[in-house]
Image (tube, rainbow, N blue to C red):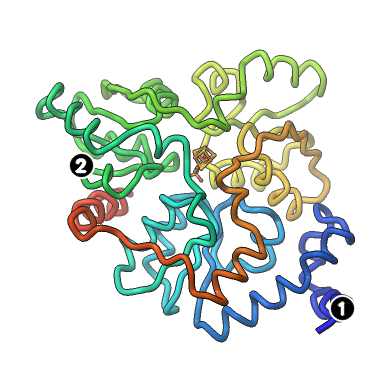
Amino acid sequence: MGASSAIARTRSLYERVRKVVSPVEWALMAADVEAILELKRARNAVILAHNYQAPAIFHCVADLVGDSLALAREARSVEADTIVLAGVHFMAETAKLLNPDKRVLIPDTRAGCSLAESITPEDVRLIRARYPGVPVVTYVNTSAAVKAESDICCTSGNARAVVESLGVERVVMLPDEYLARNIAAETDVDIIAWTGHCEVHELFTAADVAELRASYPGLVVLAHPECSPEVVAAADYSGSTAGIARYVEAQRPGRVVLLTECSMSDNIAALNPGIDFVRPCNLCPHMKRITLPKIRRALETMQHEVTIDPAVAEGARRAVERMLEVR
Ligand code: 13P
Ligand code: SF4
Protein backbone atom coordinates (compact mmCIF):
# COMPACT_ATOMS: atom_id res chain seq x y z
CA MET A 1 0.00 0.00 0.00
CA GLY A 2 1.64 3.28 -1.09
CA ALA A 3 1.43 6.45 1.00
CA SER A 4 -0.45 8.30 -1.73
CA SER A 5 -3.16 5.63 -1.94
CA ALA A 6 -3.52 5.65 1.87
CA ILE A 7 -4.02 9.42 1.66
CA ALA A 8 -6.70 8.95 -1.00
CA ARG A 9 -8.48 6.21 0.96
CA THR A 10 -8.51 8.24 4.20
CA ARG A 11 -9.75 11.47 2.61
CA SER A 12 -13.08 11.46 4.50
CA LEU A 13 -11.27 10.93 7.82
CA TYR A 14 -8.93 13.79 7.03
CA GLU A 15 -11.96 16.06 6.65
CA ARG A 16 -12.54 15.66 10.42
CA VAL A 17 -9.19 17.21 11.31
CA ARG A 18 -8.23 19.36 8.34
CA LYS A 19 -8.68 22.56 10.37
CA VAL A 20 -5.95 21.50 12.80
CA VAL A 21 -3.77 19.02 10.84
CA SER A 22 -1.91 20.18 7.71
CA PRO A 23 -1.92 18.03 4.50
CA VAL A 24 1.82 17.45 4.98
CA GLU A 25 1.24 16.11 8.50
CA TRP A 26 -1.63 13.93 7.29
CA ALA A 27 0.58 12.45 4.58
CA LEU A 28 2.75 11.08 7.40
CA MET A 29 -0.25 9.78 9.35
CA ALA A 30 -2.60 8.28 6.77
CA ALA A 31 -0.94 4.83 6.56
CA ASP A 32 -0.94 4.44 10.35
CA VAL A 33 -4.57 5.56 10.61
CA GLU A 34 -5.61 3.06 7.95
CA ALA A 35 -3.58 0.23 9.54
CA ILE A 36 -5.01 0.95 13.01
CA LEU A 37 -8.60 0.81 11.72
CA GLU A 38 -7.89 -2.56 10.08
CA LEU A 39 -6.09 -3.93 13.16
CA LYS A 40 -8.96 -2.90 15.43
CA ARG A 41 -11.29 -5.05 13.33
CA ALA A 42 -8.86 -7.96 13.19
CA ARG A 43 -8.16 -7.90 16.93
CA ASN A 44 -11.73 -7.08 18.06
CA ALA A 45 -10.29 -4.06 19.86
CA VAL A 46 -11.57 -0.61 20.78
CA ILE A 47 -9.60 2.54 21.44
CA LEU A 48 -10.54 4.75 24.38
CA ALA A 49 -8.93 8.19 24.05
CA HIS A 50 -8.64 11.02 26.54
CA ASN A 51 -9.51 14.59 25.50
CA TYR A 52 -5.78 15.48 25.54
CA GLN A 53 -4.86 13.07 22.76
CA ALA A 54 -3.66 14.55 19.47
CA PRO A 55 -6.46 15.31 16.95
CA ALA A 56 -5.76 12.40 14.58
CA ILE A 57 -6.02 9.93 17.47
CA PHE A 58 -9.01 11.67 19.02
CA HIS A 59 -11.05 12.23 15.85
CA CYS A 60 -9.87 9.48 13.48
CA VAL A 61 -9.08 6.22 15.31
CA ALA A 62 -10.74 6.43 18.76
CA ASP A 63 -14.04 4.64 19.42
CA LEU A 64 -14.79 6.42 22.69
CA VAL A 65 -13.43 9.79 23.82
CA GLY A 66 -13.88 11.88 26.93
CA ASP A 67 -12.63 13.01 30.32
CA SER A 68 -11.37 10.60 32.98
CA LEU A 69 -14.88 10.09 34.35
CA ALA A 70 -16.41 9.32 30.95
CA LEU A 71 -13.59 6.92 30.07
CA ALA A 72 -14.11 5.06 33.36
CA ARG A 73 -17.89 4.90 32.79
CA GLU A 74 -17.51 3.84 29.14
CA ALA A 75 -14.91 1.22 30.01
CA ARG A 76 -17.67 -0.71 31.80
CA SER A 77 -19.75 -1.10 28.63
CA VAL A 78 -17.02 -2.21 26.24
CA GLU A 79 -17.82 -5.50 24.52
CA ALA A 80 -14.60 -5.93 22.54
CA ASP A 81 -11.91 -8.35 23.75
CA THR A 82 -9.19 -5.71 23.88
CA ILE A 83 -9.11 -2.08 25.02
CA VAL A 84 -6.28 0.18 23.87
CA LEU A 85 -6.06 3.14 26.21
CA ALA A 86 -4.84 6.26 24.42
CA GLY A 87 -4.11 8.20 27.57
CA VAL A 88 -1.90 7.83 30.61
CA HIS A 89 -1.16 4.80 32.75
CA PHE A 90 -3.64 5.47 35.56
CA MET A 91 -6.44 5.61 32.98
CA ALA A 92 -5.40 2.21 31.60
CA GLU A 93 -5.32 0.81 35.14
CA THR A 94 -8.83 2.14 35.78
CA ALA A 95 -10.05 0.47 32.58
CA LYS A 96 -8.41 -2.79 33.68
CA LEU A 97 -9.92 -2.56 37.18
CA LEU A 98 -13.36 -2.28 35.60
CA ASN A 99 -12.65 -5.00 33.01
CA PRO A 100 -10.56 -7.61 34.80
CA ASP A 101 -11.31 -10.22 32.11
CA LYS A 102 -10.36 -8.09 29.13
CA ARG A 103 -6.95 -7.35 27.73
CA VAL A 104 -6.05 -3.67 28.30
CA LEU A 105 -3.10 -2.29 26.34
CA ILE A 106 -1.19 0.95 26.79
CA PRO A 107 0.92 1.93 23.77
CA ASP A 108 3.75 3.36 25.92
CA THR A 109 4.29 2.26 29.51
CA ARG A 110 6.14 5.49 30.28
CA ALA A 111 2.94 7.55 29.91
CA GLY A 112 2.75 8.53 33.59
CA CYS A 113 1.38 11.53 35.48
CA SER A 114 3.03 13.95 37.93
CA LEU A 115 0.03 13.68 40.25
CA ALA A 116 0.15 9.88 40.32
CA GLU A 117 3.89 10.12 41.04
CA SER A 118 3.35 12.47 43.98
CA ILE A 119 1.94 9.93 46.43
CA THR A 120 2.53 6.33 47.55
CA PRO A 121 0.35 3.83 49.43
CA GLU A 122 2.62 4.33 52.45
CA ASP A 123 1.85 8.07 52.40
CA VAL A 124 -1.87 7.28 52.50
CA ARG A 125 -1.40 4.95 55.47
CA LEU A 126 0.50 7.69 57.33
CA ILE A 127 -2.24 10.23 56.56
CA ARG A 128 -4.89 7.82 57.87
CA ALA A 129 -2.91 7.37 61.08
CA ARG A 130 -2.74 11.14 61.44
CA TYR A 131 -6.47 11.70 60.78
CA PRO A 132 -8.18 8.60 62.19
CA GLY A 133 -11.75 8.10 61.02
CA VAL A 134 -11.56 10.82 58.33
CA PRO A 135 -12.54 9.37 54.93
CA VAL A 136 -9.90 9.46 52.20
CA VAL A 137 -11.06 10.65 48.75
CA THR A 138 -8.48 9.90 46.07
CA TYR A 139 -8.29 11.51 42.65
CA VAL A 140 -8.25 8.91 39.87
CA ASN A 141 -4.86 10.34 38.83
CA THR A 142 -3.15 7.83 41.16
CA SER A 143 -1.83 4.28 41.01
CA ALA A 144 -4.11 1.33 41.73
CA ALA A 145 -2.07 0.73 44.90
CA VAL A 146 -2.94 4.22 46.19
CA LYS A 147 -6.59 3.77 45.22
CA ALA A 148 -6.63 0.54 47.23
CA GLU A 149 -5.80 2.52 50.39
CA SER A 150 -8.70 4.93 49.77
CA ASP A 151 -12.39 4.99 50.66
CA ILE A 152 -13.55 6.38 47.35
CA CYS A 153 -12.14 7.90 44.16
CA CYS A 154 -13.14 11.09 42.37
CA THR A 155 -12.36 12.87 39.12
CA SER A 156 -12.35 16.58 38.36
CA GLY A 157 -15.87 16.02 36.96
CA ASN A 158 -17.45 14.71 40.16
CA ALA A 159 -15.12 15.75 43.02
CA ARG A 160 -17.61 17.97 44.83
CA ALA A 161 -20.44 15.43 44.47
CA VAL A 162 -18.18 12.66 45.79
CA VAL A 163 -17.02 14.72 48.78
CA GLU A 164 -20.59 15.69 49.67
CA SER A 165 -21.93 12.16 49.12
CA LEU A 166 -20.04 10.98 52.19
CA GLY A 167 -22.20 13.03 54.56
CA VAL A 168 -19.27 13.97 56.82
CA GLU A 169 -17.83 17.29 57.97
CA ARG A 170 -14.24 16.57 57.02
CA VAL A 171 -12.41 14.55 54.34
CA VAL A 172 -8.85 14.01 53.22
CA MET A 173 -8.53 14.67 49.47
CA LEU A 174 -5.45 13.34 47.64
CA PRO A 175 -3.11 14.06 45.93
CA ASP A 176 -3.87 17.31 44.02
CA GLU A 177 -3.54 20.30 46.31
CA TYR A 178 -5.15 22.68 43.85
CA LEU A 179 -8.13 20.47 43.05
CA ALA A 180 -8.67 20.03 46.81
CA ARG A 181 -8.49 23.77 47.44
CA ASN A 182 -10.77 24.55 44.50
CA ILE A 183 -13.37 22.08 45.78
CA ALA A 184 -12.97 23.44 49.32
CA ALA A 185 -14.02 26.83 47.95
CA GLU A 186 -17.29 25.32 46.69
CA THR A 187 -18.38 23.16 49.63
CA ASP A 188 -18.93 23.40 53.39
CA VAL A 189 -17.02 20.14 53.89
CA ASP A 190 -13.61 20.73 55.48
CA ILE A 191 -10.91 19.39 53.14
CA ILE A 192 -7.44 18.28 54.16
CA ALA A 193 -5.16 18.44 51.09
CA TRP A 194 -1.91 16.82 49.99
CA THR A 195 0.87 18.62 48.08
CA GLY A 196 0.72 17.03 44.61
CA HIS A 197 0.50 19.22 41.52
CA CYS A 198 -0.05 18.67 37.83
CA GLU A 199 3.11 19.73 36.04
CA VAL A 200 1.05 21.11 33.14
CA HIS A 201 -1.65 23.07 34.98
CA GLU A 202 0.62 24.51 37.66
CA LEU A 203 2.36 26.51 34.90
CA PHE A 204 -0.64 28.82 34.45
CA THR A 205 -0.68 31.92 36.68
CA ALA A 206 -3.24 34.62 37.49
CA ALA A 207 -0.83 37.09 35.83
CA ASP A 208 -1.10 35.03 32.61
CA VAL A 209 -4.89 35.37 32.77
CA ALA A 210 -4.64 39.16 33.21
CA GLU A 211 -2.18 39.38 30.31
CA LEU A 212 -4.37 37.25 28.06
CA ARG A 213 -7.43 39.35 28.84
CA ALA A 214 -5.48 42.55 28.10
CA SER A 215 -4.20 41.16 24.78
CA TYR A 216 -7.46 39.59 23.57
CA PRO A 217 -10.52 41.76 24.25
CA GLY A 218 -13.70 39.79 24.95
CA LEU A 219 -11.74 36.65 25.79
CA VAL A 220 -13.61 33.96 27.75
CA VAL A 221 -11.24 32.09 30.09
CA LEU A 222 -11.93 28.44 30.97
CA ALA A 223 -9.68 26.72 33.51
CA HIS A 224 -9.26 23.12 34.60
CA PRO A 225 -9.50 22.72 38.42
CA GLU A 226 -5.94 21.35 38.50
CA CYS A 227 -4.96 25.03 38.02
CA SER A 228 -4.23 27.03 41.17
CA PRO A 229 -7.19 28.61 43.04
CA GLU A 230 -5.87 32.04 41.96
CA VAL A 231 -6.13 31.02 38.29
CA VAL A 232 -9.56 29.46 38.80
CA ALA A 233 -10.77 32.64 40.57
CA ALA A 234 -9.54 34.73 37.60
CA ALA A 235 -11.32 32.46 35.06
CA ASP A 236 -14.92 32.68 33.83
CA TYR A 237 -15.55 28.96 34.35
CA SER A 238 -13.74 25.96 35.79
CA GLY A 239 -14.52 22.33 35.08
CA SER A 240 -13.23 18.98 33.94
CA THR A 241 -12.09 18.58 30.36
CA ALA A 242 -15.60 17.37 29.47
CA GLY A 243 -17.11 20.33 31.35
CA ILE A 244 -14.91 22.71 29.36
CA ALA A 245 -15.95 21.08 26.06
CA ARG A 246 -19.63 21.31 27.05
CA TYR A 247 -19.22 24.98 27.99
CA VAL A 248 -17.73 25.83 24.57
CA GLU A 249 -20.43 23.94 22.69
CA ALA A 250 -23.31 25.42 24.72
CA GLN A 251 -22.10 29.03 25.10
CA ARG A 252 -20.22 29.34 21.80
CA PRO A 253 -17.95 32.18 22.97
CA GLY A 254 -16.52 34.28 20.12
CA ARG A 255 -13.01 34.00 21.53
CA VAL A 256 -11.88 31.57 24.18
CA VAL A 257 -8.79 30.26 25.92
CA LEU A 258 -8.63 26.86 27.60
CA LEU A 259 -6.20 26.79 30.52
CA THR A 260 -5.46 23.11 30.19
CA GLU A 261 -3.43 20.79 27.98
CA CYS A 262 -3.32 22.34 24.53
CA SER A 263 -4.38 19.43 22.29
CA MET A 264 -7.78 19.88 23.90
CA SER A 265 -8.13 23.22 22.06
CA ASP A 266 -7.30 21.53 18.75
CA ASN A 267 -9.84 18.77 19.38
CA ILE A 268 -12.64 21.19 20.20
CA ALA A 269 -11.62 23.66 17.47
CA ALA A 270 -11.94 20.91 14.85
CA LEU A 271 -15.63 20.59 15.82
CA ASN A 272 -16.39 24.27 16.32
CA PRO A 273 -15.54 26.42 13.30
CA GLY A 274 -16.10 30.11 13.91
CA ILE A 275 -14.76 30.13 17.47
CA ASP A 276 -11.40 31.84 17.90
CA PHE A 277 -9.21 29.70 20.20
CA VAL A 278 -6.29 31.52 21.80
CA ARG A 279 -3.70 28.80 22.39
CA PRO A 280 -0.95 29.19 24.95
CA CYS A 281 0.47 25.71 24.50
CA ASN A 282 1.27 23.61 27.58
CA LEU A 283 1.61 20.01 26.44
CA CYS A 284 1.45 17.04 28.80
CA PRO A 285 4.63 15.09 27.97
CA HIS A 286 3.02 11.88 29.27
CA MET A 287 -0.09 12.15 27.12
CA LYS A 288 2.11 12.97 24.13
CA ARG A 289 4.00 9.69 24.48
CA ILE A 290 0.97 8.09 22.86
CA THR A 291 1.27 8.38 19.09
CA LEU A 292 -0.31 6.77 16.03
CA PRO A 293 2.75 4.55 15.32
CA LYS A 294 2.73 3.34 18.94
CA ILE A 295 -1.00 2.57 18.83
CA ARG A 296 -0.42 0.63 15.60
CA ARG A 297 2.45 -1.26 17.19
CA ALA A 298 0.36 -2.00 20.30
CA LEU A 299 -2.28 -3.63 18.12
CA GLU A 300 0.24 -5.50 16.00
CA THR A 301 2.12 -6.95 18.97
CA MET A 302 -0.69 -6.86 21.59
CA GLN A 303 1.71 -4.99 23.89
CA HIS A 304 1.89 -3.50 26.52
CA GLU A 305 -0.63 -5.35 28.59
CA VAL A 306 -1.70 -3.65 31.82
CA THR A 307 -1.79 -5.95 34.83
CA ILE A 308 -2.71 -5.12 38.41
CA ASP A 309 -1.45 -6.92 41.47
CA PRO A 310 -4.43 -8.98 42.75
CA ALA A 311 -3.49 -7.86 46.28
CA VAL A 312 -4.45 -4.27 45.40
CA ALA A 313 -7.00 -4.79 42.60
CA GLU A 314 -9.96 -5.59 44.82
CA GLY A 315 -9.57 -2.52 47.07
CA ALA A 316 -8.85 -0.22 44.14
CA ARG A 317 -11.87 -1.52 42.21
CA ARG A 318 -14.08 -0.94 45.25
CA ALA A 319 -12.95 2.72 45.47
CA VAL A 320 -13.56 3.30 41.73
CA GLU A 321 -16.93 1.52 41.69
CA ARG A 322 -18.08 3.45 44.75
CA MET A 323 -17.26 6.66 42.85
CA LEU A 324 -19.26 5.52 39.82
CA GLU A 325 -22.32 5.03 42.03
CA VAL A 326 -22.29 8.75 42.95
CA ARG A 327 -24.60 10.71 40.71
P1 13P B 1 -10.20 15.20 33.28
O1 13P B 1 -10.73 14.15 34.20
O2 13P B 1 -10.86 16.54 33.49
O3 13P B 1 -10.26 14.75 31.87
O4 13P B 1 -8.67 15.47 33.64
C1 13P B 1 -7.70 14.47 33.58
C2 13P B 1 -6.37 15.04 33.61
O5 13P B 1 -5.38 14.34 33.62
C3 13P B 1 -6.25 16.48 33.63
O6 13P B 1 -4.94 16.86 33.61
FE1 SF4 C 1 -1.17 14.12 34.82
FE2 SF4 C 1 -1.19 16.74 34.41
FE3 SF4 C 1 -0.64 15.12 32.39
FE4 SF4 C 1 -3.14 15.25 33.39
S1 SF4 C 1 -2.02 16.86 32.34
S2 SF4 C 1 -2.01 13.39 32.87
S3 SF4 C 1 -2.72 15.56 35.57
S4 SF4 C 1 0.60 15.39 34.27
User: Which residue position is annotated with label 2?
Assistant: 149
Give the label on residue 241, or none: none
Q: Position of residue 166 (x, y in %)?
A: 21, 37
Q: Where is residue 224 in the image (x, y as percent from the top left)?
A: 54, 33
Identity of the residue drawn at 79% across and 42% down: 275
Secondary structure at badge 1 equals helix
Q: Residues within 10 Å of mark 1 (few under 14, many from 20)?
A: few
Image quadrant occupied by the N terminus: bottom right
Q: Where is residue 296 in the image (x, y as percent from the top left)?
A: 62, 71
Q: Position of residue 76 (x, y in %)?
A: 37, 66
Q: Is mark 1 within 8 Å of ligand 1?
A: no
Identity of the residue drawn at 16% across and 29% down: 128
Q: In which quarter of the image is residue 281?
A: top right
Amino acid carrying mark 2 in the image: Glu
User: Which residue position is annotated with label 1?
Assistant: 8
Q: Residues within 10 Å of mark 2 (few under 14, many from 20)?
A: many
Amino acid carrying mark 1 in the image: Ala
Cα–Cα span, label 1 and label 2: 52 Å
Left or right of residue 65: residue 254: right
Identity of the residue drawn at 89% across and 61% down: 23
